[in-house]
Amino acid sequence: EVQLVESGGGLVQAGGSLRLSCVGSGYSFDDYHIGWFRRAPGKEREGVSCIDTFNGKAYYADSVKGRFTISRDNAKTTVYLQMNNLKPEDTATYYCAAGLNPVRIFSAYEYGYWGQGTQVTVSS
């Protein structure tokens, strides 16, 4: 059974940092891209970052470029999302998802497995 488990969310002041983790199990970890998505209340789900766990190639949405860094530790089957200089508009539930060679990197339809989400709240 494929499982993705996120952790690391919390409450932080604007300008602060958090590191999210996504642990994958039940599948061949480096066969799948891992994407991070977020959904804020009343807003559409948004893809923020993605990593090819095989070669480490990273992708970022414009809204987080320069502030977020995605990385992976294949030995731990874990993907991290380091979030720096957080802004109130980053407040959302963050989900990681596994996709097999996604073409549209930030399309949720390209990802077949999802975690349960972790809440990030940034206060102003």
Image: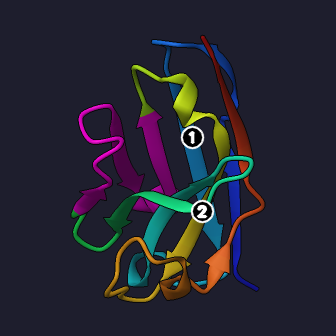
Which one is nearer the viewer's eye here, 12 or 74?
Answer: 12
Position of residue 49 relative to residue 31, above or below, is above
Mark 1, Cα crowd under 10 Å, few <14 / some 14-19 / many 20+, is: many
Quarter of the figure with the N terminus: bottom right
Q: Nearer the viewer, residue 70 or 54?
A: 70
Give left or right: position of 50 versus 124. left
Give the residue at x 34% y 82%: 104
Q: Which residue is outermost to the front?
A: 42
Expressed as whole percent of the image width and height from the top left, the position of residue 51 reads 34, 63
The residue at which mark 1 appears reads as 20
> Does the magenta-highlighted stretch encompass residue 47?
no
* Left or right: 99, with 85 as reference point: right
Closer to the camera in the image, 22 or 111: 111
The image quadrant of residue 102 is: bottom left
| Front in this rendered view, residue 115 or 27 | 115
Q: Position of residue 94 (x, y in %)?
A: 63, 50
Indicate the amino acid at tag 1: Leu
Three-letter amino acid code of the residue under disc 2: Arg
**Marks 2 and 1, Cα distance to the nearest angstrom?**
18 Å
Quadrant in the picture for residue 52: bottom left
Which residues are drawn in magenta? 58-82
Badge 1 marks a residue whose secondary structure is strand
Q: Is residue 81 above or below residue 90?
A: below
Q: In the figure, 1 relative to 45: above or below?
A: below
**Number of numbered callouts drawn:** 2
Residue where numbered disc 2 is placed: 45
Q: Residue at x 32, y 31 (%)?
A: 67
Residue 100: percent from left, percent from top: 44, 89
Helix, strand or loop for disc 2: loop
Which of discs 2 and 1 lies nearer the camera? The answer is: 2
How crowded is the residue under tag 2: few (<14 C-alpha within 10 Å), some, or many (20+)?
some
